[in-house]
Image (tube, rainbow, N blue to C red):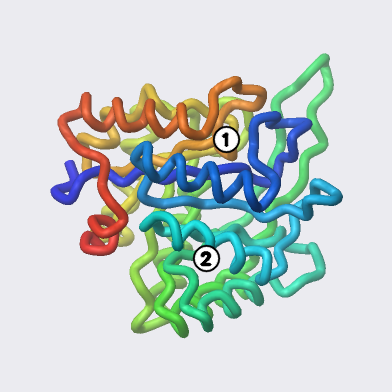
Amino acid sequence: MSKGGTWIEVALNGPWGTAIQPGIPISHEAIVREAIACAHAGASIVHFHAYDESTGRQNDDWENYARTIAAIRDAVDVIAYPTVPLGGSGVDRYRHIDELGRRGLIEWAVVDPGSLDIVLPARDGEIDPGFVYLNPPDHVREGLHVCRDYGIRPSYAIYEPGFTRLGALLAAEYPGLPRPVYRFMFSDQFAWGFPPEPYALDAHVRLLGACDAAASWMIAGLGVDIEPLAAEAIGRGGHLRVGLEDARFGTERTNVQLVEAAVRLVQRAGSRPATAADVRAAL
């Protein structure tokens, strides 16, 4: 169990749009409002995607993120950080991270050390065509380079065990880089990685111990309920990420309700929700 309390991160929306996850906040005002409410409920870390309010599509211009992060930080002390555009989208994936880092607006950044197929299981006898979540090594290195330049902590999403091995290897190329946080990704609804089972958590923790034993880690996922795995993760010194980006599609729970449930799980496990100051001190 972590001495400084258990971190609770909330992922407010993700790339899904309201057709897939109806309860996600889209507008600037809604994202700020939910981030503040989740912080008051017990979250110390907030992750979000910015949207174009007129089209309902993701918009990764750095000014959108700067505006939202500044509004959140003016109201509450949390670690607030954005996503990055998909690989193959034809844009510089880390330009907004560079701009935000240059202005001292972010402490963490998404750097996912590996690629994988994003595919849903069969529905009505047909398999979802899916797509490749592309993170080639040169993209990972670009993200780590920007993180090192501005002292930003890489937040690694570990979809498959090999992501841990490659992430540790690439991070070692950048002396002075803040040690990455490894976020073990589980899923009930997607056909990648592990389901949220104790054997899977054990495999992730053992591999991380061999690759980067001093690193901090969290459990999370997409299309998943990680609550049954929370007590074991907390007992082993891990942390939690919840929120509508990660929750099973179509859930009726809100971001605040998911954070409140995580707080209860943390307390039941004999820990306490960490503050943002606790997270910074632990790192």
Q: Is residue 211 above or below residue 151?
A: above
Instruction: Estimate the x, y position of residue 53 in percent, counting from the top left.
Output: 78, 51
- Give percent across and percent down for residue 19: 78, 31
Foreground of the two, 74 or 2: 74
Q: Is residue 113 visible?
A: no
Q: Which residue is mark 2?
A: 70
236 to 281, vertically: above or below: above
Residue at horizontal 46 percent and vertical 40 percent from the top:
37
Instruction: Please say if the residues under marks 2 and 1 sit with CB atoms less than 8 Å apart.
Output: no
Residue 111 % position (x, y): 53, 63
Q: Which residue is mark 1?
A: 244
- Of labels 2 and 1, earlier in sequence is 2
- Around disc 2, counting alpha carbons within 10 Å, would you say few (fewer than 14), some (14 to 19), or many (20 or more)? some
The quarter of the picture where the N terminus appears is top left
| Quarter of the figure that contains the C terminus | bottom left
Tell me the residue at 45%/81% (across/down). Answer: 150
271 over 161 or under it: above or below: above
183 and 47: which is toward the camera = 47
Q: Quadrant of residue 169?
A: bottom left
Task: Residue at 40% x, 45% y: name it.
Answer: 39
The image quadrant of residue 229 is top left
> Which amino acid type is shown beneath numbered disc 2?
Ala
Does residue 59 sit above or below 94 in this rendering?
above
